[in-house]
């Protein structure tokens, strides 16, 4: 008997025992659904277990029939699941408690229902990235009405390597009053900063693209660790941030922060780009993140919780180590005119919106590459224990380009997986080399599908960023 068959049998036996002692019928049914991926009540599992044990007991010569027998069980599982659904529905009506596992079953009811989206403001003109990040004089109005720093560039930097008031950022920060600004001249700064008072830090950019550069970390966390009520960072380059637990970051935002902004920054080859939680809003504008990821737990950006995450005119690419390009647990996430591209990195997914809420993705490019770990570009509400049940659940993907550049050996190229906790709509998008979606309740409207890049009129994929169309190249 092969090891995987032993594992299958042991897993089903444990689940069956746990279901038998769970207590209430609804609790037992729900445990079975969550633990065995929807395999119905105890009787059905015991029937399947008996068949598997019969095959295993007769030797390896019948193992080839395992798949066929499991497929034959699908009808029984489906019938049992429908019975369980009916039972849960009766309990819901009696108790007044809604069970989120049923939301995906109801999602199809949204088909044809007008979608009332929250206002997101006027979209800004698309930003041409070209070969570099947008210039520092590009100022984008936020989508939310939150305070901004008033800033007029000084004639001379506050911090530089010589001939300035300060020759290091730490001294300038210590002397700064709350809600003031610090200007950095280009150069290498072998330091990091823990920010506990509201401050704006602006890096000047030289005529040849020179920036203030940082590669040190504080407290085993990040180059900039933010717990101030309000913080904004512009125009700097942060690179090579790695820590012992492999969860370092260019920037870490702590839960006390109400407003966190970055504009025109570059983050390279670090374990995370941005990580953390905020009490209010996180804004990422006109920036570049590349080469993030480590050990399956670090990502291009990972916001565990916030009222709002807004990403605009920004590129995330080449995430590695099975990290997600963008991972958000914010109650409201908006991605506009941006690029989320795996290229040849070993990322997990382009977008993991694991907790539900409001998600709006417009005018952007999402790409999975030949080394991407998973078969899906997008995952919605896949972490059931972390779903925000009190949030309004809406997901809209409109006027985007989705590309799956793949090896011939890859079997599946799915647009999205997960659960529909509310309406999930893909409208007016272009889908290239995507062969399915594993998502019940997803609504597709006026999308164009292409088998290959050539069919879509796109350049041949070469593993480089220049083979990924920028939003301005097609979203006009």
Image (cartoon, grey):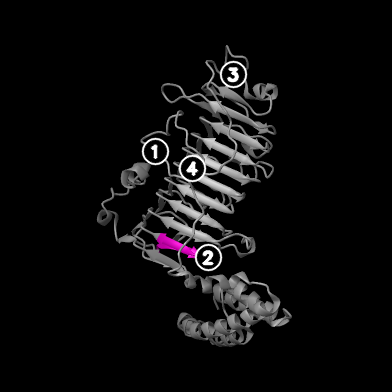
Residue 44 lies in magenta, yes or no? no
* Picture quadrant of residue 195: top right
**Is 40 placed left or right of 334 in the picture?**
right
**Is 8 placed left or right of 132 in the picture?**
right
The mark that comes first in sequence, 1 or 4, is 1
Category of crowding for the residue at label 1, using alpha-carbon neighbours closer than 10 angstroms: few (below 14), some (14–19), many (at least 20): some
The nearer-to-camera label among 1 and 3 is 1
Place of residue 268 in the rendered image (x, y in percent of width and height, measured from the top left): 50, 37
The nearer-to-camera label among 1 and 4 is 1
Relative height, residue 204 to residue 459 (above, below): above
The nearer-to-camera label among 2 and 4 is 2
Residue picked out by circle 2: 422
Mark-to-mark CA distance, 1 and 4:
22 Å
Category of crowding for the residue at label 3, using alpha-carbon neighbours closer than 10 angstroms: few (below 14), some (14–19), many (at least 20): many
Quadrant position of the N terminus in the picture = bottom right
Q: Are marks 2 and 4 in contact (CB under 8 Å)?
A: no
**Res 464 visible:** no
Residue 291 is tagged as: 4
Place of residue 346 in the rendered image (x, y in percent of width and height, measured from the top left): 47, 51
Mark-to-mark CA distance, 3 and 2:
50 Å
Residue picked out by circle 3: 158
The nearer-to-camera label among 4 and 3 is 3
Q: Secondary structure at mark 1?
A: loop
Q: Residue at left 48%, top 73%?
A: 109
- In-front residue for pair 349/150: 150
The mark that comes first in sequence, 3 or 2, is 3
Mark-to-mark CA distance, 2 and 4:
33 Å
Residue 127 is tagged as: 1
Q: Residue at left 58%, top 86%?
A: 44
Place of residue 100 in the rendered image (x, y in percent of width and height, measured from the top left): 61, 69
Range of residues picked out in magenta: 412-426
């Amino acid at each position: 008997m092969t090891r995987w068959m032993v594992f299958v049998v042991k897993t089903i036996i444990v689940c069956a025992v746990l279901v038998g002692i769970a207590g209430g019928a609804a609790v037992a049914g729900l445990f079975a659904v969550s633990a065995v991926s929807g395999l119905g009540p105890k009787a059905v599992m015991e029937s399947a277990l008996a068949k598997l044990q019969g095959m295993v007991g007769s030797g390896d010569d019948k193992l080839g029939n395992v798949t066929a027998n499991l497929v034959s069980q699908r009808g029984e599982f489906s019938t049992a699941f429908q019975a369980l659904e009916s039972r849960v529905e009766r309990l819901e009506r009696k108790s007044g408690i809604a069970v989120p596992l049923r939301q995906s079953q109801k999602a199809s009811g949204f088909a044809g229902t007008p979608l009332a989206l929250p206002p997101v403001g006027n979209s800004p003109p698309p930003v041409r990235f070209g070969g570099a990040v947008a210039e520092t004089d590009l100022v984008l109005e936020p989508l939310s009405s939150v305070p901004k720093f008033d800033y007029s560039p000084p004639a001379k930097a506050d911090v530089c390597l010589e001939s300035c008031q300060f020759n290091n950022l730490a001294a300038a920060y210590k002397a700064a009053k709350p809600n003031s600004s610090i200007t950095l001249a280009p150069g290498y700064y072998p330091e990091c900063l823990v920010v506990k008072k509201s401050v704006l830090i602006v890096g000047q950019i030289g005529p040849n693209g020179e920036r203030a550069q940082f590669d040190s970390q504080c407290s085993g966390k990040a180059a900039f660790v933010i717990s101030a009520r309000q913080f904004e960072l512009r125009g700097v380059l942060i690179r090579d941030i790695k820590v012992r637990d492999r969860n370092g970051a260019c920037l870490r935002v702590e839960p006390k922060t109400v407003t966190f902004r970055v504009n025109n920054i570059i983050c390279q080859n670090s374990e995370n780009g941005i990580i953390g939680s905020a009490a209010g809003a996180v804004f990422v504008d006109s920036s570049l993140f590349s080469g993030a990821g480590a050990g399956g737990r670090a990502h291009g950006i990972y916001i565990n919780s916030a009222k709002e995450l807004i990403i605009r005119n920004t590129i995330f690419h080449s995430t590695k180590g099975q990290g997600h390009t963008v991972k958000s647990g914010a109650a409201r996430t908006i991605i506009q005119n941006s690029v989320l591209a795996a290229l040849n990195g070993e990322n997990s997914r382009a977008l993991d919106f694991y907790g539900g809420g409001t998600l709006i993705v417009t005018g952007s490019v999402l790409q999975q590459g030949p080394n991407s770990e998973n078969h899906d570009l997008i995952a919605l509400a896949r972490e059931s224990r972390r779903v925000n049940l009190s949030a309004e659940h809406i997901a809209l993907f409109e006027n985007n380009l989705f590309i799956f550049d793949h090896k011939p050996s890859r079997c599946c190229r799915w647009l999205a997986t997960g659960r529909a906790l509310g309406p999930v709509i893909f409208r007016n998008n272009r889908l290239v080399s995507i062969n399915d979606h594993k998502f019940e309740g997803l609504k597709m409207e006026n999308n164009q599908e292409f088998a290959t890049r050539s069919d879509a009129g796109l350049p041949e994929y070469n593993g480089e960023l220049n083979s990924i169309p920028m939003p301005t190249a097609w979203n006009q």
